[in-house]
Every structure is written in C-alpha cells, then in structure tokens.
C-alpha cells in the first residue's frame, strides 16, 4: 500500500503549513502563534496539523529545519591557491549574504534569530546543520592565519569575535537601525565585508605576533 503522506498533494499541504507557520512564528513567536492562525493562512483544514505533525511544537521544529536547509548561502568552496585571508573574506561574504540574498524569505532569518535568542529543542538542528559546519571552516582558516602554537581557547575566542560581527549584521538589523539610524541606509555589502575582514585580520595578526613571541620564548619557533 502506497504511503499517502508521500504523494504530491499531501507534500504540498505540508509545505503550505510550514511556510505559513514560519511566517506566523516569526511575527508572533512560538507560544503566541495558534494552530487556527497557521491553518487559516495556509488555507488548509485544522486536521492537517495532526495529520502531518503531532502538535505545534513538532511543527515548529520542522519549520526550523526547513529554514536552515533552504538557506541559499552555503559555505564557498576554496579557490585553488587562495590565501587564508582570501578564504576568510569569502566566508564573511557568505555570512553577510544571509541579509542581502533575495532568494531567502525574511522570516527564515527572523525565526532563526528568535531560536538563537530563546532556544528550544529545535536549536540542535540549527547547530548541526547551519552553525557547526561554518565554525569548522572558520576555525581552519583562523588556525592557518595564527599558525602553530595557537591554543584551543585562542582559536575559539578568535572565531567568536569574527562570528559575532557577522551575527550582528545578519540577525540584528533592527537593532543596528536604531543604534545608528543615520547609517542604516548607507551600509553596502562590500563595505561591510571589507570592514569586518580588516577589523578581524588586524586582531588575528596581533594574536599571531603574540603567539610567535610565546613560541620563540619556548624555543618552538
């Protein structure tokens, strides 16, 4: 007997529920959103929720996974012969494109920001499918720039410092517009990327000098 949940009609209903729920969760939050609102916006019967998801929380988890899986901003492959600095710029650009990509509905970014600020069990999907793979790539780049002798804590702090700059621009646009209203409409993609890159490299090179001096003092240069 065919699995009726896999036919085109039911998959389309599931997609409508996820899209509608994503918009409403982003607007109102997980707890304030209601099943009635979601099914009305999706244009489906209330019973569809129970058919596809056990409850609102399972639907929310599915929405988070959907938003993460459909991010158009993927980790850029390293160009042959690219320096660590060039790869870092490409990485920062990928992060910033989460703001500028028109292929991504705005509720994706808003909802992921909500989840990071007020985590639920769905945070695991965000970590494993979106954040952790990016951290691995960034740590490889940072490790190459800092060179031998960098401690795990130094790598972690450097990564968090760079990631924090990206995170602010991607997930806190409303805050930035309120803090710097005169600059809000003047930010340009390339300008932001160049600033984060220069600021980060200045810090990384300063760390590298200290690490080299420490290694030299230990006779491990």
Image: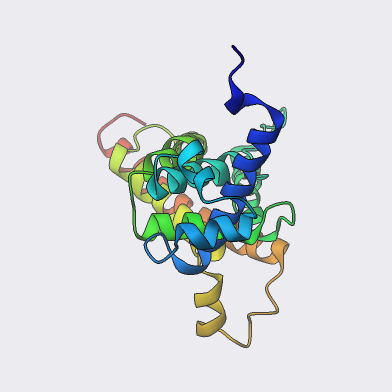
Instruction: Answer whether residue 199 is visible to the viewer in this image.
Output: no
Image quadrant occupied by the N terminus: top right
Q: At 37% across and 62% down in the image, what residue appears?
A: 31
**Measuring 56% from the left and 71% from the top, which residue is drawn there?**
173
Q: Residue furthest bottom?
A: 182
Please give left or right for residue 46 compared with residue 13 in the image.
left
> For the point 50% across and 83% down, which residue is it?
179
Q: Is residue 119 left or right of residue 146?
A: left
Residue 182 sits above or below residue 69 on the image: below
Q: Is residue 179 above or below residue 124?
A: below
Please tell me in which quadrant of the rendered image residue 217 appears.
top left
Residue 45 falls left or right of residue 188: left
Image quarter where the C terminus lies is top left
Where 138 sits versus 19, above or below? above
Q: Please tell me which residue lies in front, 183 or 42.
A: 42
- Count of numbered circles in the view: 0
The residue positioned farthest toward the left in the image shown: 218
Q: Residue at x 49, y 33 (%)?
A: 140
Along the line of sight, which residue is nearer the eye, 111 or 207?
111
Q: Nearer the viewer, residue 33 or 86?
A: 33
User: How are the residues colored?
Assistant: rainbow
């Amino acid at each position: 007997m065919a699995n009726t949940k896999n036919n085109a009609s039911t998959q389309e209903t599931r997609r409508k529920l996820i899209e509608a729920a994503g918009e409403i969760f982003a607007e109102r939050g997980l707890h304030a959103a209601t099943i009635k609102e979601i099914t009305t916006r999706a244009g489906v019967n209330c019973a569809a929720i129970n058919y596809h998801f056990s409850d609102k929380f399972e639907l929310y988890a599915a929405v988070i996974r959907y938003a993460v899986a459909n991010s158009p901003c993927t980790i850029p492959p390293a160009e042959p012969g690219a320096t660590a600095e060039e790869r870092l710029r490409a990485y920062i650009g990928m992060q910033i494109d989460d703001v500028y990509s028109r292929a991504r509905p705005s509720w994706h970014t808003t909802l992921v920001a909500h989840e990071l600020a007020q985590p639920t069990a769905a945070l695991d999907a965000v970590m494993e499918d979106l954040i952790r793979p990016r951290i691995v790539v960034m740590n490889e780049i940072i490790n190459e720039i800092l060179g031998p002798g960098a401690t795990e804590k130094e790598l972690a702090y450097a990564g968090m410092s760079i990631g924090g700059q990206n995170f602010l621009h991607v997930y806190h646009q409303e805050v930035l517009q309120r803090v710097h209203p005169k600059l809000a409409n003047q930010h340009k993609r390339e300008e932001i990327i160049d600033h984060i890159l220069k600021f980060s490299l200045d810090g990384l090179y300063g760390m590298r000098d200290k690490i080299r001096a420490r290694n030299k003092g230990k006779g491990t240069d």
